[in-house]
Image (cartoon, rainbow, N blue to C red):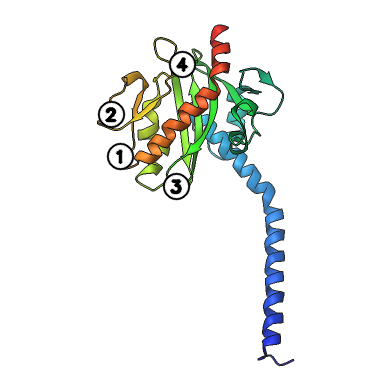
């Protein structure tokens, strides 16, 4: 076969494509369990961060097992239903009608008492944003939050995942004096809002900030029946 001919070039290229595809497929299969495990550890780290526990990849699983004492799913009516809260895919759940969603709840013990952790998912400027919000036992006062993003601009929208943005959420309340769910208002400097429900928006990251505000309102609204049921039992 003429190595300078088109037939040889085509056969050679085809063989190389098949070989590379086979290598990549094998690598994906071999690495998938590790990738899944790493994602689980990162999820536990982020959840722990919402209750002010900084965990490393080495100790996240042990600290999670020590701190998270209960987890379960609830439906839109706030009723507990069967299923594994940790494995729920929020992206898939949020694609469903509200009345069909499965909502994960995590309960944790801290030196400052029982906390409830609620997973969140929304949309920023360039892609999805997500996180965890922890409420005190009164199911009104925020104990801590942890936010993350995919593709937000460094120095602008990406600031939602930094302590200067997240720390001010502590101590804010999500219900007003009349018992209405108002969530948290992520406000610009010239925007008036009650201080107990307000945090400052990211400078230059208005769309991401408002996306996060909408995420909080939407997801806390989904959990409102559960929160109401729990509060009535206190």
- Does residue 134 appear left or right of residue 25 in this picture? left
Say what secondary structure mark 1 lies in.
loop
The quarter of the displayed image where residue 98 is located: top right
- Which residue is identified by label 2? 191
Q: Position of residue 123 (x, y in %)?
A: 48, 39
- Which residue is identified by label 3? 126
Number of callouts: 4
Q: Earlier in the sequence, mark 2 or mark 1?
A: 2
Q: Residue at x 46, y 16 (%)?
A: 140
Near mark 3 (Cα within 10 A), the count class, few <14, some 14-19 or many ≥20, is some
Near mark 2 (Cα within 10 A), the count class, few <14, some 14-19 or many ≥20, is few
The CA span between labels 4 and 3 is 31 Å
Q: Earlier in the sequence, mark 1 or mark 4?
A: 4
Q: Position of residue 4 (x, y in %)?
A: 65, 91
Q: Is residue 59 above or below residue 151?
A: above
- Which residue is identified by label 4? 140
Mark 2 or 1: the one toward you: 2
Q: Earlier in the sequence, mark 4 or mark 3?
A: 3
Give yes or no for contact between labels 3 and 2 (Cβ–Cβ under 8 Å).
Answer: no
In the rendered image, the quadrant that contains the C terminus is top right
The CA span between labels 2 and 1 is 13 Å
- Which residue is identified by label 1? 203
Say what secondary structure mark 4 lies in.
loop
Q: Is residue 157 above or below residue 49?
A: below
């Amino acid at each position: 076969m003429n190595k300078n001919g088109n037939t040889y070039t085509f056969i050679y290229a085809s063989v190389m494509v098949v070989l590379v595809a086979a290598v990549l497929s094998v690598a994906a299969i071999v690495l998938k369990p590790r990738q899944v495990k790493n994602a689980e550890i990162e999820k536990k780290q982020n959840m722990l961060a919402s209750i002010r526990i900084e965990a490393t990849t080495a100790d996240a699983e042990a600290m999670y097992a020590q701190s998270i004492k209960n987890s379960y799913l609830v439906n839109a009516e706030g009723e507990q239903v069967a299923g594994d809260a940790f494995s729920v895919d929020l992206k898939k759940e949020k694609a469903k009608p509200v009345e069909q969603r499965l909502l994960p709840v995590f309960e944790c013990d801290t030196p400052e008492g029982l906390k409830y952790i609620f997973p969140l998912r929304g949309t920023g400027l360039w892609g999805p944003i997500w996180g965890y919000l922890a409420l005190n036992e009164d199911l009104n006062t925020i104990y801590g939050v942890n936010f993350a993003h995919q593709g937000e601009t460094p120095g602008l929208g990406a600031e939602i995942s930094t302590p200067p943005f997240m720390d001010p959420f502590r101590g804010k309340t999500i219900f007003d004096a009349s018992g209405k769910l108002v969530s948290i208002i992520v406000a610009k400097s010239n925007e008036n809002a009650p201080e107990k429900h307000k945090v400052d928006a990211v400078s230059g990251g208005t769309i991401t900030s408002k996306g996060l505000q909408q995420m909080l309102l939407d997801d806390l609204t989904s959990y409102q029946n559960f929160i109401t049921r729990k509060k009535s039992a206190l």
